[in-house]
Image (cartoon, helix red, strand yellow):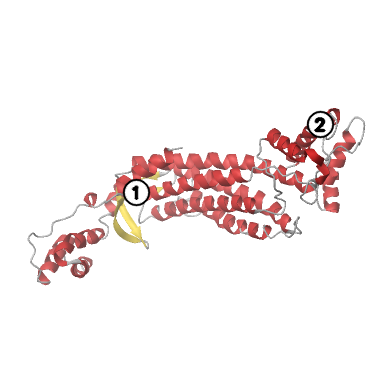
Amino acid sequence: MVASWLRTEAALATAQGDLGVITEAEGQAVAQACEDLEVDYEALWASARNVGYPILGLVRQIAASLPAGPDGRVHYGATTQDIMDTGLVLQLTEAGAVITDHLNNIGDAVARLVDEHAETLMPGRTHGQQAVPTTFGAQLAPLLAELTRQRARWAAAAEGVRVVSLFGAGGTNAAQGPRSRDVRAAVAETLGLSTTDVSWHPSRDGLADFAQTAAALTATCARMARNVIDLSRTEIGEIGEAAGKHRGASSTMPQKANPILAEGIIGLAGVAGPLSAGMFRAMEVPQERAAGEWQIEWYVLPHLMGLSAAALKATTELVEGLRVDADRMRANLDHDGGLIMAEAYMISLAPVLGRERAHDVVYSAVGQVRAGRATLTEAVTAAVAAAGADLATTPTRIDPADYLGEATAMCAAAVEAWTRR
């Protein structure tokens, strides 16, 4: 944090020296002092508590360390918010790069799973109950598409905050003189940031967007984690976290292998989302400068970056180590007596009976299957006869593999979209 402020002060002095706002020698001396300064943190934080902000104390330490002593050229024409905002942007740039790396790793791992399991049959579930057949790849394809959209959002949000702040005391930059725009552009170039001609001291929409997007990333991670917890239940057992000695162990139940990564991710996301909402209050800045709203950012953004990075790192580990039991997935298709094919039978009968009547016929057949009186195919045949319908052929068993619709095509589309960078 302090290092980013010193980088900003050094870039400012160098730019001002190069452009004649101060002498070149003065600019070089200040920049060197910023590089060499051994910060007295105890004094700095004592000053910050007294002043309310840390930059005045830091500027005094830089000035005192100059070979010729304080000369009034440190922090020339700038204001505290210029230095703190630009320093914040430098820190968010570094944090954003870490999150981007994790996001890419997650997407790459999910893309591999989608491709590998594009035809791995499993039950699709709605409202927690078996619905229609799908494939594990098709279940993950919407997640991969979501990650693709999140990647684009994150890139835009991360780039959106990478803007230098150098507009002076009231946002007009009057103290910088006629070269103010040139100084700002030079500082931005030195620090690898973008520049703008309009002050963003009171406008925190970019930071709020950054925070909300980071929180949304953790929500996507939590969705993945929730699926792992649900599908690794003992009664389902279709996927599971990476195994290892005492991995997820219980202190009292030796059989337990709890989904600890998934649980942690859900916990992190559960805090990140509500925390990010604080940035909406931080946007309520009056006139040219905040009066308490700014301080919200000081708590929200550092904590949110930590939560987001931790959630994405854990999700990377979760997805890369995921165990997939294709045999269990296939077996679970028959768990409810094959009733997962009920819609398929209804659709096959609809051209002859009409959709509503076909629904009633198959609904009646489902009751027979649940009573243990017949297979679904047998029950449908009997229900058709009981309904007095005259079919050209007797219904035959429909294989789940023949009722997948666009499942495999969606897998291919999702993988292609992710890999198109």
Residue 390: quarter of image: bottom left
Say whether disc 2 or disc 1 marks the residue closer to the N-terminus. 2
**199 displayed left or right of 59:** left
Residue 55: quarter of image: top right
Q: From mark 2 to mark 1, how far is it between C-alphas?
A: 60 Å
- The disc at residue 51 is none
**276 displayed left or right of 10:** left
The N terminus, quarter of image: top right
Q: Residue at 67%, 53% (x, y): give it.
A: 204
- Residue 170 visible (yes or no): yes
263 versus 22 height, above or below: below
Image spot of residue 279 (x, y percent): 64, 56
Q: Residue at 30%, 60% (x, y): give it.
A: 131
**71 displayed left or right of 82:** right
- Amino acid residing under circle 2: Gly
- Residue 320 visible (yes or no): no
- Amino acid residing under circle 1: Ala
**99 displayed left or right of 245:** right
- In this view, the residue in front, 76 or 324, is 76
Image spot of residue 192 (x, y percent): 66, 35
Residue 364: quarter of image: bottom left
Image spot of residue 166 (x, y percent): 75, 44
224 versus 26 height, above or below: below
259 versus 391 height, above or below: above
Q: Which residue is mark 1?
A: 138
For mark 1, give the secondary structure.
helix
Neighbour tally class for label 1: few under 14, some 14-19, many 20 plus, Cα within 10 Å: many
Q: Which residue is mark 2?
A: 17
